[in-house]
């Protein structure tokens, strides 16, 4: 590949080209190059000429095990890359030491990623000279036993990740010189016994993660002097039994996550977030927790609590209570009704919780109530209707809940109600009218057979989702009173036999889905839309209809009525997986139609003239030819999928266009008439052996994937506008010729097993 010609190339991505073993020396003459990605290749050396790439900002050698074994050959070159900001050697597992020349990148290197370098035993002292380094990732360096003394030159370091450095036993006291450090991650450092007292110098430290530091016995008392400290995670610190008294001085501490509760917890009077995530052995809360009078957020997620005890008079400022995944929790004390400031109550995955106390109706400030997957919840108290501020109620997958209190209709502020996955057999008559309800979700209520006529009172309802209600046999006639309804989803309502005539009154309806409604045979002519076997002639009455989605209509065998051409507002028409043979000529009158999707209509043999308003056309067909497309002056994208007999593509409109071809096995693209193509994507076209792009003068992006027999691409070396080339899984292609691609910025050749030379 004549890389020298691609003088404007900015990104060279050769990742996953497993047979690639070397780069040509000419790579050093690509003066505009900013990024090189050699991830997962077999490259054993990088040419010395790379040191001429003065604009190179990112060098990626992820999982280049062959490269790391001969890293000495590139040490000098890397040190001369004066603009290098990102060096990623993740997964270079055989690399036991860093090249010394990295120390020369003091003024440029900002990110150094050595994650998964298992053999790396030590960091050289010159690492302290990287004055611009902001991000140092040593996660998974399992052999790393110690850190060097840190000088004050590492003054820009903000993020230091030592995740699962399992052999690390101690920190040098000089770590206190990292004055700019904000995030320190020591999770999984199981041999680490202590932190140096010099941690007090971390004046900028905000986050300290000590999860799984099983040998850590104590925290330095000086930790209380960290004025910027906000986040401390101590989960699974099994040897840590107490917090130093100075923690009470952490006035900025907002997030504290512990495995056990020390008595000194009451000192944190300014705590904004208190978490006890995953404390499986904790079965009760100490009384001292009630002294956190300013606490707005209490996270008790994953505890083994069997009961939320009486806490009357406490938590006057509490706004968020999280009891998620407290799987043993069976009862909540009625004292919860005293939490007058509570706005969010999260009980998701409390699988043993059987009911809520009636006092929950006293939470006048409650806006969010999450009961998702409370599998044992059998009853909702009628007092729930008193929650006048409630804006979110989630009852998804409360599979034991077989009925709802009628008072739920009094939730006048509720815009959305999620009842997905309930065992309801009937949506009952509800008091009130859900004055603010806009979205009602009843998805996958598989036992639901009947919906009460009271649904017609929901005058603000915009979306009604009944997808997967496989037992639902019909809709009430009152559905015609939903004067604001825009979206009706009846996908996979297998037992639905009819839809009431009153649906014709829904003048605002824009979207209806009847995907895989196996028992539905017709819809009344009042709306003029039936499915499965036939579309009625009255379909043209839906003058405001914008989207018509007919998916998996495998019985739609009759002709589509010509009245479909009267849908003057229709913008999107999708008929997929249907055994139709043609479309009516009247389709050309759909003056607003922009998207036409005929995907997987494999028996479609003839298409009439299409409306000139189309911007996106996606189709499958059983024909060797397509209709004329040159008049589609607004067309932006053309997708051809599984057109098994298609041999050629007709002339396209004279405008910038994107062409996507997938699984058209007989297609032999002759692209001499497609001079305005800007994007060309060809996937799974096994008949394609050679591709001539010489006439595509406007082509900017080329994507080719899974074309197993493609041996050669011709004519692309003279395309002056071509900026991107991506070739993936083309196992027969051995080389690319790039001679005059002045604008090429991105080149990716991934998983091309026979590509051997660049």
Image (cartoon, rainbow, N blue to C red):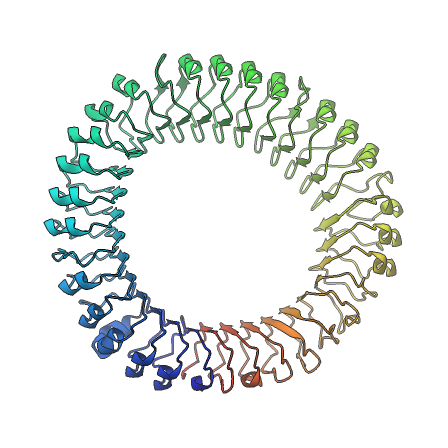
Q: Is residue 562 left or right of residue 736?
A: right
* x and y, in percent, of residue 352 in the image: 42, 24
Determine the image quadrant of residue 489. top right
Determine the image quadrant of residue 31. bottom left
Which quadrant: the C terminus?
bottom left
* x and y, in percent, of residue 678 in the image: 62, 72
Q: Is residue 91 left or right of residue 574?
A: left
Residue 120 visible in rendering: no
* x and y, in percent, of residue 285 in the image: 29, 21
Q: Is 555 or 589 nearer to us in this picture?
A: 589
Q: Is 719 or 279 nearer to us in this picture?
A: 719
Q: Is residue 97 above or below residue 734?
A: above
- Residue at 26% from the left image edge and 43% from the top image edge: 209
Q: Is 228 or 606 nearer to us in this picture?
A: 228
- Residue at 28% from the left image edge and 52% from the top image edge: 159
Residue 114 visible in rendering: yes
Which quadrant: the N terminus?
bottom left
- Residue at 27% from the left image edge and 24% from the top image edge: 269
Q: Is 658 or 730 nearer to us in this picture?
A: 658
Q: Is residue 328 left or right of residue 374?
A: left
Q: Is residue 45 above or below residue 357?
A: below
Determine the image quadrant of residue 622. bottom right
Count of numbered tags: 0
* x and y, in percent, of residue 476 in the image: 76, 28
């Amino acid at each position: 590949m004549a890389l020298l010609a691609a003088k404007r190339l900015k990104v060279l991505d050769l990742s996953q080209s497993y047979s690639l073993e070397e780069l040509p020396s000419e790579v050093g003459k690509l003066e505009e190059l900013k990024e090189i990605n050699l991830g997962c290749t077999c490259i054993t050396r990088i040419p010395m000429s790379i040191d001429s790439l003065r604009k190179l900002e990112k060098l990626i050698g992820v999982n280049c095990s062959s490269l790391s074994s001969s890293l000495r050959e590139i040490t000098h070159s890397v040190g001369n890359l004066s603009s290098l900001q990102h060096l990623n050697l993740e997964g270079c597992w055989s690399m036991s030491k860093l090249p010394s020349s990295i120390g020369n990148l003091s003024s440029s290197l900002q990110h150094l990623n050595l994650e998964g370098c298992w053999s790396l035993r030590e960091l050289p002292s010159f690492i302290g000279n990287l004055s611009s380094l902001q991000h140092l990732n040593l996660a998974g360096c399992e052999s790393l036993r110690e850190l060097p003394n840190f000088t004050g030159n590492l003054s820009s370091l903000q993020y230091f990740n030592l995740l699962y450095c399992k052999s690390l036993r101690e920190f040098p006291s000089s770590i206190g010189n990292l004055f700019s450090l904000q995030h320190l991650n020591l999770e999984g450092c199981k041999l680490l016994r202590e932190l140096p007292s010099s941690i007090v110098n971390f004046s900028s430290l905000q986050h300290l993660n000590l999860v799984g530091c099983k040998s850590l016995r104590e925290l330095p008392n000086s930790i209380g002097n960290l004025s910027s400290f906000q986040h401390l995670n101590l989960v699974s610190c099994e040897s840590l039994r107490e917090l130093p008294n100075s923690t009470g001085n952490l006035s900025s501490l907002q997030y504290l996550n512990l495995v056990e509760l020390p008595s000194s917890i009451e000192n944190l009077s300014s705590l904004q977030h208190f978490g006890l995530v995953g404390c499986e052995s904790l079965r009760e809360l100490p009384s001292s927790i009630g002294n956190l009078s300013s606490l707005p957020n209490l996270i008790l997620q994953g505890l083994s609590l069997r009961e939320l005890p009486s806490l009357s008079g406490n938590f006057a400022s509490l706004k968020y209570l999280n009891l998620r995944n407290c799987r043993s929790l069976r009862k909540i004390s009625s004292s919860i009704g005293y939490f007058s400031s509570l706005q969010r109550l999260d009980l998701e995955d409390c699988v043993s919780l059987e009911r809520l106390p009636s006092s929950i109706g006293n939470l006048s400030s409650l806006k969010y109530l999450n009961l998702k997957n409370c599998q044992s919840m059998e009853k909702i108290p009628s007092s729930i209707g008193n929650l006048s501020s409630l804006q979110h109620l989630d009852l998804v997958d409360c599979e034991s809940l077989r009925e709802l209190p009628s008072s739920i209709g009094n939730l006048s502020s509720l815009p959305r109600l999620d009842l997905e996955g309930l065992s309801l057999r009937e949506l009952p008559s509800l008091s009130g009218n859900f004055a603010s309800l806009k979205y009602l979700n009843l998805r996958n209520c598989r036992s639901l057979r009947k919906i009460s006529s009271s649904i017609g009172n929901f005058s603000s309802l915009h979306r009604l989702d009944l997808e997967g209600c496989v037992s639902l046999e019909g809709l009430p006639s009152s559905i015609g009173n939903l004067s604001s309804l825009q979206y009706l989803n009846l996908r996979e309502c297998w037992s639905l036999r009819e839809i009431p005539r009153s649906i014709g009154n829904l003048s605002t309806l824009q979207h209806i889905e009847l995907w895989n409604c196996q028992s539905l045979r017709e819809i009344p002519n009042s709306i003029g839309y039936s499915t499965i076997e036939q579309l009625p002639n009255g379909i043209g009455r839906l003058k405001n209809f914008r989207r018509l989605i007919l998916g998996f209509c495998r019985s739609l065998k009759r002709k589509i009525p010509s009245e479909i051409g009267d849908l003057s507002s229709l913008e999107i028409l999708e008929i997929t997986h249907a055994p139709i043979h043609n479309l009516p000529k009247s389709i050309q009158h759909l003056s607003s139609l922009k998207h036409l999707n005929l995907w997987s209509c494999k028996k479609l043999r003839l298409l009439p003239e299409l409306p000139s308003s189309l911007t996106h056309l996606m189709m499958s067909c059983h024909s060797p030819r397509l209709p004329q497309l040159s008049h589609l002056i607004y067309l932006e994208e053309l997708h051809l999928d599984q057109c098994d007999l298609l041999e050629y593509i007709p002339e396209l409109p004279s405008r910038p266009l994107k062409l996507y071809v997938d699984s058209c096995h007989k297609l032999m693209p002759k692209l001499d008439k497609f001079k305005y193509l800007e994007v060309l994507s060809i996937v799974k076209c096994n008949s394609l052996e050679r591709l001539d792009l010489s006439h595509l003068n406007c082509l900017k992006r080329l994507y080719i994937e899974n074309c197993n027999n493609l041996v050669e691409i011709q004519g692309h070396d003279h395309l002056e506008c071509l900026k991107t080339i991506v070739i993936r899984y083309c196992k027969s292609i051995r080389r690319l010729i790039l001679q005059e691609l002045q604008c090429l910025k991105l080149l990716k050749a991934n998983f091309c097993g026979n590509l051997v030379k660049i």
